[in-house]
Image: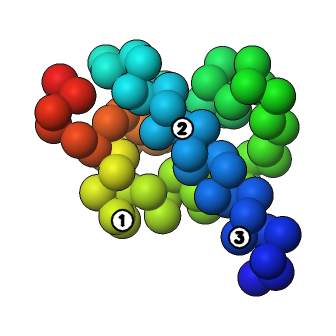
């Protein structure tokens, strides 16, 4: 992974954490997060990239995920203090 890729991922992660601090009960799919959480911040993230970032955040405990009946994954805050 290049330095630019790591910087970009850190930028997206920071934007997601800011969003979750401001919207404590937010929950959405990867597509919804890209369109409604990140795009208004001026961040455009491709589908595969956002899923990889979100999955890393789940592995770190920063987000939680669960499969929906339609097969999509719903992401929410992993910090129980946000609840």
Front tag of 2 and 1: 2
User: For numbered disc 3, what is the local secondary structure?
Assistant: helix
User: In the image, 76: left or right of 30?
Assistant: left
> Measuring 56% from the left and 49% from the top, which residue is drawn there?
13
Q: Residues within 10 Å of mark 2 (few under 14, many from 20)?
A: many
User: Circle 1 is placed at which residue position?
Assistant: 59
Q: Secondary structure at mark 2?
A: helix
Horizontal side of 45 relative to 13 (left or right) equals right
Q: Nearer the viewer, residue 65 or 19?
A: 19
Left or right of 72? Residue 45 is right
Q: Is residue 2 left or right of residue 48?
A: right
Task: Identify the mark nearer the N-term, 1 or 3.
Answer: 3
Report crowding for label 1: few under 14, some 14 to 19, many 20 or more residues within 10 A (C-alpha).
Answer: few
- Front label number (1 vs 3): 3
Q: Name the residue at 79% across, 77% down.
A: 3
Q: Position of residue 65 (x, y in %)?
A: 35, 45
Where is 4 relative to 74, above or below?
Answer: below
Does residue 4 lie above or below 34 as drawn?
Answer: below
Q: Quadrant of the N terminus?
A: bottom right
Residue 25: image quadrant is top left
Residue 30 on image: x %, y %: 59, 38
- Which is more toward the observer, 6 or 68? 6
Give residue 27's quadrant in the image. Answer: top left
Q: Nearer the viewer, residue 34 or 21?
A: 21
Q: Which residue is mark 3?
A: 6
> How much space separates mark 3 and mark 2, taking CA atoms?
15 Å
> Which residue does the numbered mark 2 point to in the structure image?
16
* Alpha carbons under labels 1 and 3: distance apart: 17 Å
């Amino acid at each position: 992974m290049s330095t630019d890729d790591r910087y970009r991922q850190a930028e997206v992660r920071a934007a997601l954490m800011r969003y979750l601090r401001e919207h404590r009960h937010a929950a959405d799919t990867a597509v919804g997060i890209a369109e409604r959480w990140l795009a208004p911040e001026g961040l455009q993230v491709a589908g595969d990239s956002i899923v990889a970032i979100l999955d890393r955040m789940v592995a770190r405990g920063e987000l939680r995920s669960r499969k929906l009946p339609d097969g999509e994954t719903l992401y929410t805050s992993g910090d129980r203090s946000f609840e």
